[in-house]
Image (cartoon, rainbow, N blue to C red):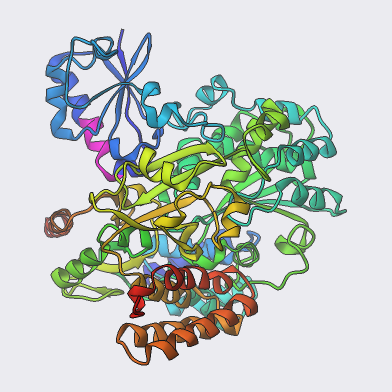
Amino acid sequence: MAKQLFIPKDSSALSVGADKVALAITLEAKKRGVDIEIIRNGSRGLYWLETMVEVATDKGRVAFGPVKANDVAGLFDDDFLNADLYIGEKCVCKNPLSLGLTEELPYLKNQQRLTFARVGITDPTSLADYLTHDGYKGLGNALKMTGVEIVKVVTDSGLRGRGGAAFPTGVKWNTVLGCESSQKYVVCNADEGDSGTFSDRMIMENDPFVLIEGMTIAAVAVGATQGYIYLRSEYPHALGALNSAIEVAKSAGYLGDNILNSGKAFHLEVRRAAGAYVCGEETSMLESLEGKRGLVRFKPPLPAIEGLFGKPTVVNNVISLATVPIILDKGAQYYADFGMGRSRGTLPIQLAGNVKHGGLVELAFGITLRELLYDYGGGSATGKPIRAVQVGGPLGAFLPESQFDTPLDYEEFSKIWAVLGHGGIVAFDDTVDMAKMARYAFEFCAIESCGKCTPCRIGATRGVEVIDKIISGTDTAKNLKLVRDLSDTMLNGSLCALGGMTPYPVLSAMNHFPEDFGVKQ
Amino acid sequence: MEASALKIESLISEHQHLPGALLPLLHAIQDNIGYVPESAYSNIAKALNLSVAEVHGVVTFYHHFRTHKPGRHILQICRAESCQSMGSEALEAHAKNCLNIDYHQTTTDDTITLVPVYCLGNCALSPAVMLDEEVYGRVTLTDLDALIEDVKIKVAA
């Protein structure tokens, strides 16, 4: 029988040569006359180990990594296909790349993967694989329930918007459910633009059906018949995975005019964004979907009441929607039993930047930054001390070492004037210049501002100019005060989070790292 | 009518009836001919019942759309925080220096257009660059040289 091998086709794995490894293994097997079957799975999210090749055994999959194409002959020489021999402490075979059973790797074993339950295990484009691994159980349950019942389950689970704003998902759905309208929409915000985040990308590339299922449940709950996934243009692999999964779901009756013979219709289409960060803001995204410039709208009206094309619209992030199926499958209480305080369930955390073991860590809320950075991340990639971390993307605060014991929880972060955002953590070693980071925050805001409100449009540019003066040592004290005044205006006067939160990285850098701004200690 | 104008006409009729048709149409045009020529604005505007100013406004609002023909390959370097923490600034400087161009410019031999990008979602393997539609992670200066060299060889062949 052919030996089964798993080689990821996730774009991060491809970025370090997964395709080359797959080709090298295919050629080497042919040369040696060995019968193998390669399955292109998703990535487990242990990215420093990519390309991670797994070999199926009766005891589970055995991992080898990070494999480069030129390691392949050596792996065959060491009989890696007889992966049984690589299991356990006293295993007879050794290869520098052997990692043992994948599921026993502490980085993976200690996680609580709910949203990411299938990621890295299945072939992302195989509906059969999805169904074997509990796929579409949530929708099956939802189709037996009323809209009100579905919304109650989502509300009781405590799920809050994982895009960053943390608004209770069930409350949003309930508003749309309560609206009378001839047409309602479900829109998935897949414009994941925060640096240090890739969980949306991973879901879309590695388990696209779970997003489709989540959106279908949302549509069934609120009575929507059309859905759009607004996907950033920087993710061509996610586009391919989603489109192929949508086609498969359509032809198998999971999408279309009569989903699973329920009499309910739901149509789904992927729309490509076009490189504007501000379109991650929900009203700007709706404008963009309507074919306009992505200018932020005034709220109210809420998108739940007057959203896409003026109709009631559920707008949720990828992770929020992809978490719905497991909630409908296992129940609200199962999900709510994870987490702390008002942050229920799990958060797919993304460890990025200058960290040794970068990757996806899904855990219940409550773990501290320090545990993540050192127990999971293994410290900095460069081996130098970690001086600062930015949590929550380019609009998130910089945290110094003294705040590393803060647990990941929406409210705990808010107490220290920081945000969890979309769960991205970017580490910086001690070579970072925080004045430069503050300047970059303003620069990014200036590049990405939609231009509708003055504090953001003008403030960001003025911010760059003032920080430049501080960097050059001109009237430091006066200009630092000016940055604070400007930040106050942006915080309180901006229309959306872009201008309104740019002061988070700027002021946190100034507050925690004054020495970088020419302030004598 | 030249080939690209004909192509644009057929793309307009293919997309004009979609709800919110403008972005999908602009994507289709750029995917097919590499950019969105200003000469197409008036036909797009007519088909979608918009003003030329509105079309211009949308094309120029989004970083992704180009109004001029790019080089044969597009090299995007990530400038976002995660990549900065792993030395992307050195990559940017190196690329500009080797190619002898700045961002949004094309090499004189028309081979590479250099574009900044703000996150490729490859942040666990920073720094990252994207060549056309392929992402590369943990990119060193030597890797970047090899990538550029590969492109030049391919174009010359």
Residue A414: x and y in percent read 60, 58
Outermost residue, front direction? A521
Q: Quadrant of residue A67?
A: top left
Residue at the (19%, 9%) spot, across then down: A92
Q: Position of residue B37 (x, y in %)?
A: 41, 75
Residue A88 lies in quadrant: top left
The quarter of the image holding the C terminus of chain B is bottom left
Viewer-closest of A176 and A419: A419
Which range of residues does the magenta coloring cover? A15-23
Q: Position of residue A437 (x, y in %)?
A: 37, 70
Residue A13 appearing in the image:
yes
Look at the picture and state if A12 lies above or below A445. above
Q: Residue B144: image x %, image y %?
A: 18, 57
Q: Image point 79% across, 44% down: which residue?
A: A223
The answer to whether residue B122 is visible is no
> What secondary structure characterizes most of the magenta part?
helix
In this rendered view, identify the residue nearer to me: A367 or A168: A367
Q: Would you place residue A18 above or below residue A182 in this image?
A: above
Write the residue at 19% across / 35% down: A68
Q: How many marks?
A: 0
Horizontal side of residue A110 vs A46, given as left or right: right
